[in-house]
Image (spheres, rainbow, N blue to C red):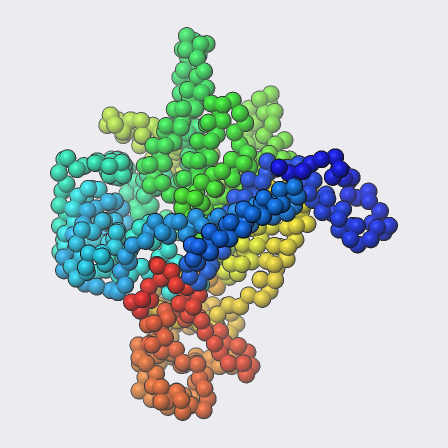
Amino acid sequence: MIDKSPRRAIPLNIRRIRWRQITFFQGLNVVFEHVATALADDREKWILSFAMFLGLGQAVYFSLMAQPSGFLLFFVLLLAAAGLWLSRHHVIAFFCCLMFAAAILGGAVVQAHLYRLQGPVLLKQVYVEDLQGKILSVEPRDGRTRLIMKPAHIDGLDDEQVPDRVRISVLGDVVARPGDGFAGKAKLFPLSVPETPGDPDFARNLYFDGIGATGFALGHSFQIIPAHDATLGEDLSGLVENTRLTIMTQINAGLEPVKAGLTNAILVGERGGVPPDLAEDLRKSGLAHLLAISGLHMGLLCGVVFFVVRFGLALVPSIALRHPIKKWAAVAGFVIGALYLLLSGATVPTQRAFVMTAIVLFAVLMDRRAISLRLVAIAAITVMVLRPDAILGASFQLSFAAVTVLVAFYQGRGALLIAGQRDLPLWQRAGRYLFVLLVTGVMVTAVTAPIIGFHFGRISFLGVISNLVAIPLMAFWIMPCVVAVLVLLPFGLQAAALAVLSPGLDMLIGLAHFIAGQDWGLWHIAQPSALAVICALLALLWVLIWQRRVLWPIAIVPMGAAVIFVITAKTPDLLIGGDQKDWALVRDDNDGLTFNSRASSFHRDIWNARFGTGFDAKISADQRCEFERCWLKKNGKVIVISEKISDPFYLCRHADVIVTLKQDFPKHVRKSCTRSPLVIDDDVLWWQGGVAVYLENGQAPAHYETVRQTSGNWPWIVIGGR
């Protein structure tokens, strides 16, 4: 127990102390006493800090270069438990030990998931003459169909080498359902590691999904084997996937393709049908969150169901006067929310939204206050325990950052904005509603700006305005129609609801196109340091959690660290892709990138986002090198990039950095070089992955780091067949 006996009582106002009349150590003791009292008085907020340090522990775990020993984690957890016991009578020490234990527990959760996911992953590219397996999910993707299957046989691999799940892409819209069989030829690849150091790690997400290989079917040389009736829906996942496909089929038949894709994204979380240009405009206009089923969708859906059920029961006096119809409506909202979670694919934002909505509805059943920061902490802990890799994703970070700041504000001074509205005229309530939306948009934009800048390299300032229109449109038009579609679809009567939904979607699409066309409202920024963003978020969360000013100075530590990381961060000058094809050089004036002539749009977008240089659909003539051998210059250093070389001695005499993408540089030539150039050749790129080169000013030599060095030795990192 924490000691709060009278002998530890201290003055309540630290500003009344005469600091000049006490020694340094006496003053330090007074500060510690005030901090201890503030922590002890707000012990109900400890769970919020626990969630924060749990996530920090998971982030630190993923930043390690390799998986630590399970015995080491267990030993450190024992030390943390011992520290908790020994410090139980000292508030500050106990709090510090508890937060340390939370961080270690976060790492232990990741370790447990990695033990659970132990299984083979593909180590090299293979052509498969005979791939057989059972289809687990079907996702239409812009003229192709993505299948996730459990392979039963992969030609050329032993049984112990076959991954548990494989994701392949096939041409066209394939008629297939979960439970069907697949047989055919395919080309399979290992999980895609970051192209260069600092690029997104898509392989980690796939690995935590249980996927050990990706690829595509060769042409149409495959067949879908329909499952027998006895196996259809044999498990919950198969039943849910078949239901999702049925809903998408009916929506595709009742709406135009663009509107159908948007409706499928909102209703079942399938975004493959959203055209790329519309998805880009939604991102530019700050409306991309509408494509990810999150708190807005879950709250509106369950809220509509809650209101309709309660209103319908209230129309029957014999029921309304004798039974708790409010609690019945809460149960109905929970059931619909659970179904919505399953239909949407249970993504991270949807899991978070469902947990929070479920707790709110449970609070209604218990006659307790629902919305609180403790609710946010419980939802965050639940998601981090179920899916620890989510902590590194933009979805988790954006959703919880936005929800935390909104709950903290509207529980505090912002409560005045939403209180006492029942006695106001309708026009004043409407005006206050729009003002609250504006304040909400400004706060969410401010708190999520560093996260959006880190992950996407651009921030939409017009998103505040677009959301002023889009959120009421979603709340009062689109989501009620979505509920009607779900209710009427089993009876085949969804056409009427889709007809009413269509104009609302037209307005949303038109809004996205209009706002996206205003280029002045889009700000491109270079990717900030990951450590700087983490420290800044820790400081912000600390201030939001602990609203006593005596505890605020503690936030100076992470905020100061964030400033230091921003100042000392170094950005690479040259990126060489691990595919041994694409590369990009930052120009001398840092106003853009120079690419190779056939750089893929995918890599261009990722690298443009990193350096904040915009997103051009095509590369202009001054942004690319058209020659087989490219001679470039940056920071006074001469760089030559070529696929193959025939005159290594000449390059050795005239270049400071030599990049040979598909050929080893002769070792005997390198030893005889008087200029000592930095050499990056096929040997480096094949065994170490992509490269980031740092070209120092002056006489300092250039140096590089590789994906292998920065990504570590994890099960999903496969480079050069190992």
Compared to residue 600, the image places residue 644 above or below, namely: below
Spot occupied by residue 328 in the image (x, y as percentages of width and height)? 41, 20
Q: Position of residue 282 (x, y in %)?
A: 41, 47
**Residue drawn at 45 percent across, 86 percent down:** 676
Looking at the image, can residue 157 be seen? yes
Q: For the N terminus, which image quadrant?
A: top right
Residue 401: % across, % down: 52, 45
| Near-viewer residue (211 or 312) | 211
User: Along the horizontal axis of the image, is 52 left or right of 246?
Assistant: right
Q: Is residue 575 above or below residue 413?
A: below
Question: Is 453 left or right of 337, judged from the image as shown?
Answer: right
What residue appears at the point 45 percent right and 32 percent down from the top-left corner?
357
In the image, residue 610 above or below residue 18? below
Asked whether, in this view, residue 85 is left or right of residue 322, the answer is right
* Front-most of residues 36 and 483: 36
Name the outermost residue toward the right: 21
Say if 583 sits above or below 487 in the image. Answer: below
x 53%, y 68%: residue: 570
Q: Quadrant of the C terminus?
A: bottom left
Q: Quadrant of residue 185?
A: bottom left
User: Which residue occupies 52% across, 29% down?
Assistant: 370
Q: How many marks?
A: 0
Quadrant of the image occupied by residue 583: bottom left
Q: Whole-percent x and y of residue 695?
A: 50, 76
Could you tell me if residue 455 is visible in this image? no
Viewer-nearest residue: 346 or 311:
346
Most foreground residue, 95 or 386: 95
Quarter-wise, where is residue 267 in the image? top left
